[in-house]
């Protein structure tokens, strides 16, 4: 398996916790099971081990991950990265625009200029 030094640049390491399943990890980290499996060749989804490190895709192609900071709003983020709020929401369908959580990871489109 991977360790944090071996995850590709556009991924981040995640350590398996007690009770974790790929479904629960994907839901909690707002990702998909298929993307996690594709990022971890050889992983046995039915035999995850506590302490095992897997790589989680940060964002789809042409997107960059950011971490929500105190005071962030979608409007402020859209202005900072010069993208539309609609494009942020499209890239993050599970994000509640009225409830951004500090520390939450979202994906920002890099190829979408604001009109």
Image (cartoon, rainbow, N blue to C red):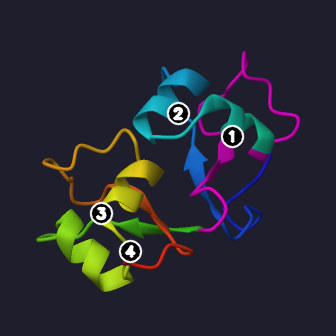
Numbered disc 3: secondary structure: helix
Give the distance between the C-alpha atoms of the residues marked 4 and 2, in whole angstroms: 26 Å
Q: In this view, does 18 lie above or below 106?
A: above
Magenta residues span 39-62
The percent position of residue 25, horizontal first and vertical second, equals 51, 32
- Residue 45 lies within the magenta run: yes
Give the distance between the C-alpha atoms of the residues marked 3 and 1, in whole angstroms: 24 Å
User: Local crowd at mark 4 within 10 Å, few (<14), some, or many (≥20)?
Assistant: many
The earlier-in-sequence mark between 3 and 2 is: 2
Of labels 1 and 4, the one closer to you: 4
Task: State the residue position of label 4.
Answer: 83
Give the distance between the C-alpha atoms of the residues marked 2 and 1, in whole angstroms: 9 Å
The earlier-in-sequence mark between 4 and 2 is: 2
Callout 2–callout 1 Cβ contact below 8 Å: yes
Q: In which quarter of the image is the C terminus?
A: bottom left
**Badge count:** 4
The earlier-in-sequence mark between 2 and 1 is: 2
The percent position of residue 112, horizontal first and vertical second, equals 50, 73
- Per the rendering, the mark at residue 35 is 1
């Amino acid at each position: 398996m991977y360790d944090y030094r071996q995850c590709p640049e556009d991924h981040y390491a995640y350590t398996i916790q007690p009770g974790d399943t790929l479904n629960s990890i994907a839901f909690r980290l707002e990702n998909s099971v298929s993307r996690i499996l594709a990022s971890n060749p050889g992983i046995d989804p039915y035999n995850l081990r506590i302490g095992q490190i897997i790589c989680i895709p940060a964002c789809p192609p042409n997107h960059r991950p950011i971490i929500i900071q105190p005071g962030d709003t979608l409007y402020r983020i859209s202005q900072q990265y010069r993208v539309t709020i609609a494009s942020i929401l499209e890239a993050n369908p599970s994000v509640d625009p009225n409830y951004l959580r500090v520390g939450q990871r979202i994906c920002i489109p890099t190829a979408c200029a604001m009109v």
